[in-house]
Image (cartoon, rainbow, N blue to C red):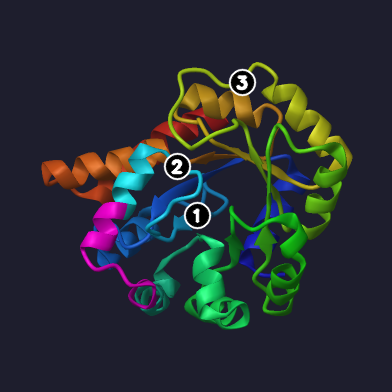
């Protein structure tokens, strides 16, 4: 198993919970992305999701959309990001996931895309706009290259589809706590605990929850039933603020992750 699969399996077996922070790749530049990745403490985090900027975001709220727009306007290129990660991969102590639109995967050709991200040191991928009916081929390519496809399940997903998605998804399931776009929320859905508990019983796989998680209390609630909490918009908002204010995004992210980690205890 690669680092992502090993890490999640060990955490799940030990009953330990973890954060999965999300950052926008190449924002504000690739060097800053690498600096953020190097700063993230694996004692608190199971993996980092790296969002690949795209001109037509799928389920991204305004905070992440802003970071995508800024990165693309600054000349973001995926190859530059992969090269930068590969150069510094030994200094990055945590598994990495690419979160990417299937349009990018398809344009590059799926096998070539998976080969490229794996060669850079990325350990898995999430493709939020990939339909279940079209996912089997990419999942097979991911397995062959030790770069598993992590799939998403929403509150509205039927029981039959949940089982089929779980069979393809590894090494964990991304449970989307809300219907709609990403973004910080004041409160999590009242049925979240029940939904995640039922999904865990049905699939037997580790479950990490994303969408709307923004505070240590949210992390505590989510990790009371799930294996991990995915935090995206709240982190990217701090990157946006650090860029606007001339502060270090890596320091801002590191400090916020330490704050969120208080919800793990």
User: Which residue corresponds to the image point at 52% horizontal and 66% vertical from the top-left?
Assistant: 103
Upstream in sequence: badge 2 or badge 3: 3
**x, y (%) of residue 190?**
65, 16
How far apart in space, not on screen, are marks 3 and 1 (Cα)? Answer: 23 Å
Q: Is residue 185 left or right of residue 204?
A: left
- Residue 192 at least partly seen: yes
Residue 49, disc: 1
Q: Earlier in the sequence, mark 3 or mark 1?
A: 1
Magenta: main secondary structure equals helix
- Disc 3 and disc 1 in contact, CB within 8 angstroms: no
| Mark-to-mark CA distance, 2 and 1 | 9 Å
Q: Position of residue 250 (x, y in %)?
A: 28, 51
Q: Is residue 4 left or right of residue 68?
A: right
| Residue in the picture at 54% in, 29% down | 219
Q: Secondary structure at mark 2?
A: loop
Q: Residue furthest left?
A: 246
Give the residue number, with chain letter if any, for mark 2. 232
Q: Is residue 142 above or below residue 242?
A: below
Tell me: residue 89, above or below residue 235.
below
Magenta-drawn stretch contains 263: no
Residue tagged 3:
189
Looking at the picture, tell me which residue is in the foreground, 134 or 211. Answer: 134
Please state the horizontal and vertical placement of residue 216, each as a whole percent of the image. 47, 26
Asked whether the residues under the numbered discs 2 and 1 touch, taking CB atoms below 8 Å apart as contact, a structural biologist would say yes
What segment carries the magenta color? 69-81
Q: Earlier in the sequence, mark 2 or mark 1?
A: 1
Residue 261, given in percent of the width and then of the height, sits at: 48, 35
Query: In the picture, which quadrant includes the N terminus?
Result: bottom right
> Callout 3 environment at 10 Å: few (<14), some (14 to 19), or many (20+)?
few
């Amino acid at each position: 198993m690669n680092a992502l699969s090993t890490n999640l399996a060990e955490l799940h077996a030990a009953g330990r919970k973890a954060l999965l922070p999300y950052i926008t790749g190449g924002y504000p530049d690739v060097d800053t992305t690498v600096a953020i990745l190097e700063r993230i403490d694996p004692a608190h985090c199971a993996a980092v999701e790296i969002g690949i900027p795209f001109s037509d975001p799928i389920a991204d709220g305004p905070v992440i959309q802003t970071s995508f727009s800024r990165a693309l306007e600054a000349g973001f290129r995926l190859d530059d990001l992969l090269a930068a990660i590969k150069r510094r991969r030994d200094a990055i102590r945590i598994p990495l996931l690419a979160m990417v639109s299937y349009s990018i995967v398809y344009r590059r050709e799926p096998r070539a895309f998976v080969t490229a991200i794996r060669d850079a040191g990325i350990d898995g991928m999430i493709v939020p706009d990939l339909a279940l009916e079209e996912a089997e081929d990419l999942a097979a390519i991911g397995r062959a290259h030790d770069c598993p496809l992590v799939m998403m399940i929403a509150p509205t997903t039927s029981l039959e589809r949940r089982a089929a998605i779980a069979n393809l998804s590894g090494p964990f399931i991304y449970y989307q706590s809300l219907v709609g776009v990403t973004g910080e929320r004041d409160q999590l859905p009242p049925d979240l605990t029940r939904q995640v508990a039922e999904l865990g019983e049905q699939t037997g796989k580790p479950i990490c929850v994303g969408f709307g998680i923004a505070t240590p209390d949210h992390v505590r609630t989510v990790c009371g039933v799930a294996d991990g909490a995915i935090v995206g918009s709240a982190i990217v908002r701090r990157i946006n603020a650090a860029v606007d204010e001339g502060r270090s995004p890596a320091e801002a992210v590191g400090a916020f992750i330490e704050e969120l980690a208080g919800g793990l205890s």
